[in-house]
Image (tube, grey):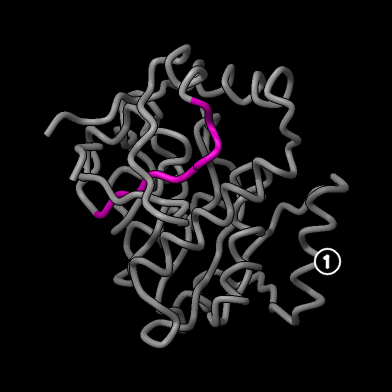
Amino acid sequence: MAALRTLGPRAAAALDEELMSTGAFSIDQLMELAGLSVAQAMYALSPPQKSPAILVACGPGNNGGDGLVAARHLHHFGYKPTMYFPKQTKNELYGRLVKQLQQLKVPFTDDFVGAAKGSDWIIDAIFGFSFSGEVREPFPGVIKALAESKIPVLAVDAPSSWNIDSGPPQDGPGQHYIPAALISLTAPKPLVKWFGGRHFVGGRFVSQEMADKYEFDVPPYKGSEQIVEVGSHGEKL
């Protein structure tokens, strides 16, 4: 089967900008839809009866915001999420997302390695399609732990530290990091060429007209589902 067309970093950034201008979406809406897709992918991989303990690692940008939203939905789905969010910002949106989790008594931890030992799955919401450059503290140790962990990982949009166009880094903590699963938001990114696990696409809100403009494919969502499982490299199943 033919693979879904990928969406490069420049096109993904331009698409986000257009969604929030002529598309009339707010950043809150986009983050809510992305986070719901992540939570649904986690449920498809392993329901809470099988794997209740989920460690959600969040970075300081929009990918981390998606993780915060996903954790709220996971709580309501019946999971017991724990948050690792070491680079909290003063951004009002993120403050509200954190407060929502605190009101649900979702715990936050500063000890990623310790929390990982008691987890059934880890969600990697550290870096997304806009990541470039050097991985800065405290994340090198976290990504090294993800690479070495026997606990399965669901990566959000990109395995953290991977280059969106060229895949895993040639050296550094993410060199051997291959998560068990990936959820591509809106469309797969070119890095899926190097991915080999279970792969979902989420983001059921883009018009066909906009997909045609940015040259990517809207997958065949079914019923009320916000995700579609595809092949590792984006092949239609």
Q: Amino acid at mark 1?
A: Lys
**Percent x, y for residue 2?**
15, 29
Please tell me in which quadrant of the rendered image residue 46 appears.
bottom left
Residue 124 or residue 30, whichever sits in front: 30
**Percent x, y for residue 14?**
58, 17
At x 49% / y 81%, what residue is drawn?
53
Q: Is residue 7 left or right of residue 198?
A: right
Residue 236 or residue 152, whichever sits in front: 236
Q: Secondary structure at mark 1?
A: helix
At x 41% / y 59%, what residue is drawn?
41
Q: Which residues are magenta?
A: 198-207
Quarter of the N terminus within the rendering: top left
Q: Is residue 232 left or right of residue 109?
A: left
Q: Which residue is mark 1?
A: 99
Q: Can residue 177 be seen at all in this image of the molecule?
A: no
Residue 144 or residue 82, whichever sits in front: 82
At x 79% / y 67%, what residue is drawn?
100
Whether 12 is drawn above or below 66: the answer is: above
At x 47% / y 52%, what residue is drawn?
226
Q: Residue furthest left?
A: 1
Whether 165 is drawn above or below 235: the answer is: above
Residue 92 belongs to the span the image colors magenta: no
Residue 201 belongs to the span the image colors magenta: yes
Please tell me in which quadrant of the rendered image residue 150 appears.
bottom left
**Percent x, y for residue 124?**
48, 55
Please tell me in which quadrant of the rendered image residue 147 appears.
bottom left
